[in-house]
Image (cartoon, grey):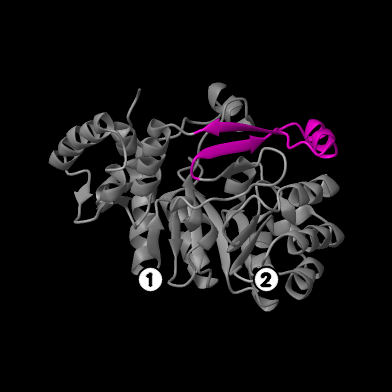
Amino acid sequence: MIDAICHELKLRKNELNTPLTTIYLGGGSPSILSNEDLGKIFLEISKNFNLSDVKEVTLEANPDDLTPEKLKFLSDFTPINRLSIGVQSFYDQDLQLMNRAHDASEAEKCILLAQEFGFSNITIDLIYGSNSTTHEMWQSNLKKAIALHVPHISSYALTVEDKTILDHQIKKGLLKPIDDSHQSDQFDFLVDFLQANDYVHYEISNFGKKGFFSQHNANYWKGEPYIGIGPSAHSYNHKERSWNIANNAQYIQSIYKDILPSQTEVLSDTDRYNEMVMIGLRTIWGLPKAGITEFPKEIQDHFAKEMERLTTENLVIEGLTHITLPPHAKFFADGIASRLFYVD
């Protein structure tokens, strides 16, 4: 798999017309890779891409993978300068419900260890809205993150995916269904508490101290082009979206025939408009009004009609150049965006 990923990097070295500014190793648990494998990937990236403009290199990591030996290697021998750690919670009962491999003590310990090895740019994931997470526990989770001087927090409501253990337990009546009002209350506390502690709520699920926003994710939200390497990885170039096959064996076989195992979708005006709405309303930067004027008249007319209704309901704020959401509407961002979507 590592060799195939390195070969795909060679095959796609001329695909981007703009310099790389960020690199993100994620989409799973790349922290399980050996030091040798990580070294091979970064060597191949440096051979095939100009890295002079790269400002941020992130590694997604499980807390139990971040041993002193691993952190020393990452610090001394890789360009990684940002860690995204899947903490989820500082309570064992939450972690057991989410079927996580680490425990609460490992979650705290790995953050302190990472800081000892010079990683100051750290983001952690925290999950709210589980029936196992009381409001007191949720407040304690956030207080713990602040006490650990974590400068960026990505926080998501617990969702129940089909055919998971959690889904099975709820259907069997072993656990209560997810309570929307419980999640909404914890989201409201999240926003108020982090903003009171100098975090900027710059995207619906993301909070960062000044200077610690995720540059990589911000590029997605601003519609910049990107290349995704590896099975299932997605790429985007303003006009098209492509994605690699999910099957590992087929991916490897195709790459070694010098054939990119990907499908491509040409984005229609409707696709591009709906994506712009969805992404724009989730961010502090908002939805650019000038961008709407680039679309056909029927889309503009639909947008104007729905905006009038949303404005009357006090669900959007229309500024001179951008449209944003008022604080009370942010938990419902996706639903509000869907009202603006245009359907052919």
**Which residue occupies the foreground of this view, 226 or 316?**
226
Q: Find residue 61 and report its image quarter.
A: bottom right
Disc 1/disc 2 C-alpha distance (Å) = 22 Å
Q: Residues within 10 Å of mark 1 (few under 14, many from 20)?
A: few
Q: Is residue 194 left or right of residue 7?
A: left
Image quarter hosting the N terminus: top right
Image quarter hosting the C terminus: top left
**Which residue occupies the foreground of this view, 191 or 275?**
275
Q: Say which residue appears at 80% left-offset and 51% top-offset.
A: 6
Q: Say which residue appears at 38% left-offset and 70% top-offset.
A: 197
The residue wearing badge 2 is 114
Task: Give whichever of discs 1 and 2 has the lower sequence position.
Answer: 2
Q: Find residue 119 and report its image quarter.
A: bottom right
Percent of width and height locating residue 111: 63, 67
The residue wearing badge 1 is 198
- In the image, the segment drawn in magenta is 238-266
Mark 2 residue type = Ala
Asked if residue 324 shows in the view, the reply is no
Q: Residues within 10 Å of mark 2 (few under 14, many from 20)?
A: many
Q: Say which residue appears at 62% left-offset and 48% top-offset.
A: 95
